Image (cartoon, helix red, strand yellow):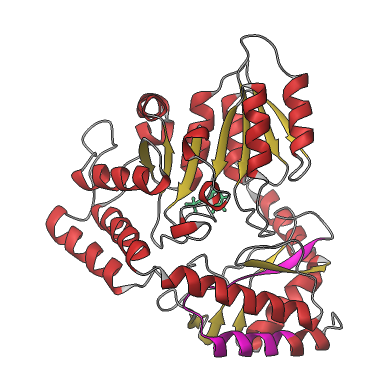
């Protein structure tokens, strides 16, 4: 018999089920594509972050296979001991260039990039001023740093300015931090305003561009490029390799002393094994494809416009989205679960997003279009949305 009882988890799970808040991930049975098979059913896939269709791109697959053949399956160590490979160095050079930064450092994920960096650059005496909708990995990093955390209302640069002014004490460091694109609403942070605020108050400015890298701005270079700002004005840029780049991992771009500090104090970098050769080489190939096939980004935005307009014309509430992420907000948790289930039966996969990921009463299904969707895919999906919306009385 085990010594402790985990029986209380059964009760808590039953409660989640009763409230429609329990997670039941569907299983992907093929490649991550615009049309693919989940749980035994062919569906139009509006659920992935595979914005540019790179997850199953032949050049990435080839690069991964070649790197595995040449450098092996695993890296064998953490970066600071024996796990820094030539491929990691090359990818970091390429990402610094991509982001217009002086240097870059690869992490195992976007999550560890954020959490590891925030915790490494701030301490107990410092303060973090953070948008209320920032990603969980920023929140966790802020807690790990033990700095004081001040949350400002979504996208409210004036409120951020007030919080920085109120918490300013000589010698105390301040970090102003925001997602570039917000993952559940698909809206874009007011980066130019926040940057001015950070500069006025002498605060460190950090942007998490997980949903913007490869998506937003000329060449998919992200939020900073989207607003035409000089990337060297931003202290820390975070990116993920797991979304538009199509593989897995994360990176930090910034000045060389930031990167050198993270090599010494970024705990995921120091204490968790580095990315395998196949992953790293596939990410390098992704940067090549993004540069050489700019039509992918163009198609992504054409699809975004078509699908968003279609949902809007049908009468759905799509919130404040301005990117390929379009939420369809229905309110109650159960309504979101029902809409998602009904759409799946109609051959369209859109996951429900419920509390605590979004506030109570703002439950939704979240759609993400990709460059791989055809016009016919999106028209068929819209038709399914119309039927499901009518059947559930949402329209
Ligand atoms: C997805 C996401 C992350 C985490 O990236 P992973 O590479 O999947 O760990 C971080 N920040 C934001 C805003 C995200 O949407």
Q: Position of residue 306 (x, y in %)?
A: 63, 79
Identity of the residue drawn at 68% across and 46% down: 190
> Would residue 366 be counted in the magenta stretch?
yes
> Which residue is painted at 73% across and 78% down in the image?
311
Q: In this image, 348 relative to 371: left or right?
A: right
- The image shows residue 307, relative to residue 96, as above or below, that is below
| Vertical relation: 357 (above or below) 32 | above
The total of numbered circles placed on residues is 0
Q: Is residue 261 above or below residue 156?
A: above
Residue 355 in the magenta stretch? The answer is no
Question: In this rendering, does residue 134 appear at all?
Answer: yes
**Residue 275 percent across, percent down from the top left:** 31, 48
In terms of depth relative to the viewer, which is nearer, 271 or 199?
199
Foreground residue among 386 and 228: 228
Percent position of residue 225, x then y: 51, 49
Q: Position of residue 368 (x, y in %)?
A: 59, 70
Quadrant for residue 342, please give it. Answer: bottom right
User: 347 or 19: which is nearer to us?
Assistant: 347
Q: From the viewer's perspective, is 225 left or right of 340?
A: left
Write down the quadrant of residue 55 in the picture.
bottom left
Of 171 and 67, which appears nearest the observer?
Answer: 171
Magenta residues (range): 362-385
Please identify the quarter of the rendering in which residue 129 is found.
Answer: top right
Most extreme residue toward the left, as rendered?
A: 70
Q: Residue at x 61, y 10 (%)?
A: 171
On the question of residue 46 being in view, the answer is no
């Amino acid at each position: 018999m085990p010594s402790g009882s985990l029986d209380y988890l059964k009760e808590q799970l039953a409660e989640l089920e009763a409230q429609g808040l329990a997670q039941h991930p569907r299983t992907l049975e093929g490649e991550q594509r615009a049309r693919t098979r989940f749980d035994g059913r062919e569906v139009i896939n509006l659920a992935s972050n595979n914005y540019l269709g790179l997850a199953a791109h032949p050049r990435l697959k080839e690069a991964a296979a070649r790197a595995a053949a040449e450098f092996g399956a695993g890296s064998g160590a953490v970066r600071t001991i024996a796990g820094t490979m030539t491929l990691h160095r090359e990818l970091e050079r390429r990402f610094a260039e991509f982001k217009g930064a002086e240097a870059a450092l690869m992490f195992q994920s976007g999550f560890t990039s954020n959490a590891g960096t925030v915790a490494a650059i701030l301490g107990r005496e410092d303060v973090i001023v953070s948008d209320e909708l920032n990603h969980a990995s920023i929140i966790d990093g802020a807690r790990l740093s033990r700095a004081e955390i001040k949350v400002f209302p979504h996208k409210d640069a004036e409120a951020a300015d007030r919080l920085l002014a109120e918490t300013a004490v000589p010698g105390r460091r301040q970090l102003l931090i925001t997602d570039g694109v917000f993952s559940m609403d698909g809206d874009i942070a007011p980066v130019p305003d926040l940057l001015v605020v950070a500069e006025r108050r002498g605060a460190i400015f950090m942007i998490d561009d997980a949903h913007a890298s490869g998506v937003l701005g000329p060449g998919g270079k992200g939020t900073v490029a989207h607003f035409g700002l000089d990337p060297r004005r931003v202290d820390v840029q975070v990116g993920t390799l797991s979304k538009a780049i199509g593989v897995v991992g994360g990176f930090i771009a910034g000045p060389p002393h930031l990167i050198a500090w993270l090599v010494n104090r970024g705990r995921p970098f120091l204490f968790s094994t580095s990315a395998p050769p196949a992953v790293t080489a596939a990410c390098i190939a992704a940067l090549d494809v993004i540069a050489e096939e700019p039509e992918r980004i163009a198609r992504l935005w054409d699809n975004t416009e078509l699908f968003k307009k279609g949902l809007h014309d049908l009468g759905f509430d799509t919130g404040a989205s301005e990117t390929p992420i379009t939420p369809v907000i229905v309110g109650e948790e159960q309504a979101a679960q029902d809409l998602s289930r009904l759409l799946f039966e109609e051959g369209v996969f859109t996951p429900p997003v419920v509390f605590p990921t979004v506030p109570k009463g703002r439950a939704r299904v979240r759609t993400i279009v990709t460059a791989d969707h055809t016009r016919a895919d999106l028209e068929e999906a819209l038709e399914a949305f119309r039927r499901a919306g009518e059947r559930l009385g949402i329209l």
